[in-house]
């Protein structure tokens, strides 16, 4: 497979590093072209890997569809992998369709809040632009695999795995993410794309219920304490807009009645986000003049705040991403949490990439291998939960990206304690909740 990666920032670097580390064992990757608006970013990653033929560096403007199409043609690529902020999704998605190759991204096209009632009614939902074009992609014989990061991505695959193997009936699915990461010398820091973090945290959160469909709610609503494994512990979580809520109900049933996404942002970070909004620094639709340049307030903030690409060596702690499922198995109530914990020190040592970027990058690389080897096949605009989850789960250990299964308090757990141990998701095994 020949892949064009657009975006050689933190996630793009991690994708290339993981692919380079894995591929000598399988040889499924012929070439991965690294392209960024800043050529020095692409060159840095290419030089880091010391393999310029298989990982060449190029410059491309993600806003220029013609440039993307020309670069794809230059290398005769099979797939364009979008590693940019979702601000550029529609353009890169359309460029892949125009060129005539497959496509993958890590997040869906952006939403737009309802102009009159944003905290009750959705308007343009995450992924609407892409999912509405399913038929065109299918008719052209192409695949656009959308939302293939960790969340969305791995979390959706976990939901599909639970539906297939672990439940007879499903009542509720909730994505639950949090961390205990600290950054030395910074009281407030962004561990991921600043632009994207502001977008998803300050847009109205979306919820799905069978009887209501999709609806929105107030920012940071419905706080709950959720226990995260890996030594992270009890974490307060709140509703945040995220893609899984838009995807899971389309593909998973077994009586499913509700889907939510909650993130452990922390009270200090929530307060900082509220202050940004109060000062209009979250705005991406107006221009401010700084010297000889005109940029949006949000772009100004991304320049002023600590760069997530440069703080990996200052980070300590772990981040946990996963999927909580509530339902019934063998006539008994059951609750489980399927998860992946990434330790920053381990990621820095193995990959020279910080944990949030590394955790995000593993899923697309595993999926690239599944596509390149013909294990996953489909046409149209398809999210990860539309595929068989088993091959992905089986590759997690090979990538040193182990998942875990936490059996939570339920009638089923009581039976398990009396009769047998729960089988682990992978070699990491289950960690029972308190």
Image (cartoon, grey):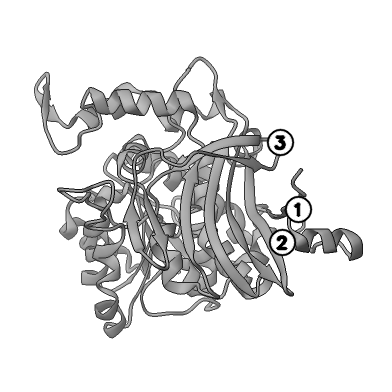
Q: Quadrant of the C terminus?
A: top right
Measuring from the top left, give residue 405's x and y in whole percent.
71, 56
Q: Residues within 10 Å of mark 3 (few under 14, many from 20)?
A: few
Could you tell which of marks 3 and 2 lies nearer the N-terminus? 3
Q: State the image quarter where residue 126 is shown.
A: bottom left
Q: Residues within 10 Å of mark 2 (few under 14, many from 20)?
A: many
Helix, strand or loop under label 3 = loop
Task: Name the residue: 47% across, 67% down.
Answer: 384
Q: Residues within 10 Å of mark 1 (few under 14, many from 20)?
A: some
Q: Quadrant of the N terminus?
A: bottom left
Task: Name the residue: 35% across, 23% down.
Answer: 305
Relative to 252, 41 lies left or right: left
The reply to whether residue 16 is visible in this rendering is: no
User: Which residue matches tag 2?
Assistant: 425
| Disc 2 and disc 1 in contact, CB within 8 angstroms | yes
The reply to whether residue 4 is visible in this rendering is: yes
Helix, strand or loop under label 2 = loop
Number of marks present in the image shown = 3
* Along the line of sight, the residue nearer the viewer: 382 or 174: 174
Residue 428 is tagged as 1
User: Which residue matches tag 3?
Assistant: 231
Helix, strand or loop under label 1 = loop
Tell me the CA gap for discs 3 and 1.
14 Å
């Amino acid at each position: 497979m020949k892949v064009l990666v657009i975006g050689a920032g933190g996630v793009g670097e991690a994708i290339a590093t993981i692919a380079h580390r894995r591929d000598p064992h399988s040889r499924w990757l012929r070439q991965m072209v690294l392209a960024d608006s800043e050529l020095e970013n692409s060159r840095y990653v290419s030089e880091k890997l010391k393999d310029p033929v298989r990982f060449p560096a190029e410059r491309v403007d993600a806003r220029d569809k013609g440039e993307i199409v020309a670069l794809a043609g230059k290398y005769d690529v099979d797939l364009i992998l979008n590693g940019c902020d979702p601000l550029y999704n529609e353009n890169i998605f359309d460029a892949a369709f125009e060129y005539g190759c497959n496509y993958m991204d890590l997040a869906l096209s952006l939403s737009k809040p309802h102009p009159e009632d944003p905290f009750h009614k959705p308007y343009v939902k995450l992924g609407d632009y892409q999912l509405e074009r399913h038929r065109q992609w299918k008719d052209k014989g192409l695949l656009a695999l959308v939302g293939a990061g960790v969340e969305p991505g791995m979390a959706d695959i976990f939901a599909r795995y639970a539906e297939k193997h672990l439940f007879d009936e499903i009542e509720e699915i909730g994505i639950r993410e949090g961390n205990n990461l600290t950054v030395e010398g910074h009281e407030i820091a962004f561990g991921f794309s600043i632009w994207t973090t502001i977008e998803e945290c300050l847009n109205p959160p979306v919820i799905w219920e069978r009887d209501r469909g999709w609806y929105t709610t107030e920012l940071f609503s419905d706080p709950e304490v959720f226990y995260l494994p890996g030594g992270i512990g009890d974490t307060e979580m709140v509703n945040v807009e995220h893609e899984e809520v838009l995807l899971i109900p389309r593909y998973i049933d077994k009586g499913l009645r509700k889907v939510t996404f909650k993130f452990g942002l922390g009270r200090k970070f929530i307060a900082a986000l509220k202050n940004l909004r109060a000062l209009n620094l979250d705005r991406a639709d107006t221009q401010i003049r700084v010297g000889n340049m005109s940029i949006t307030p949000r772009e100004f903030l991304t320049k002023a705040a600590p760069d997530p690409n440069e703080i990996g060596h200052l980070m300590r702690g772990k981040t946990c991403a996963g999927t909580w499922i509530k339902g019934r198995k063998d006539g008994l109530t059951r609750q489980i949490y399927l998860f992946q914990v990434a330790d920053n020190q381990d990621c820095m040592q193995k990959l020279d990439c910080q944990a949030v970027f590394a955790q995000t990058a593993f899923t697309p690389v595993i999926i690239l291998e599944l596509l390149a080897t013909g294990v996953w096949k489909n046409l149209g605009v398809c999210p990860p939960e539309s595929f068989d989850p088993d091959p992905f789960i089986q590759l997690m250990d090979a990538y040193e990206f182990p998942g875990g299964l936490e059996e939570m308090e339920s009638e089923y757990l009581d039976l398990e304690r009396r009769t047998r141990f729960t089988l682990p998701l992978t070699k990491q095994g289950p960690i029972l909740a308190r």
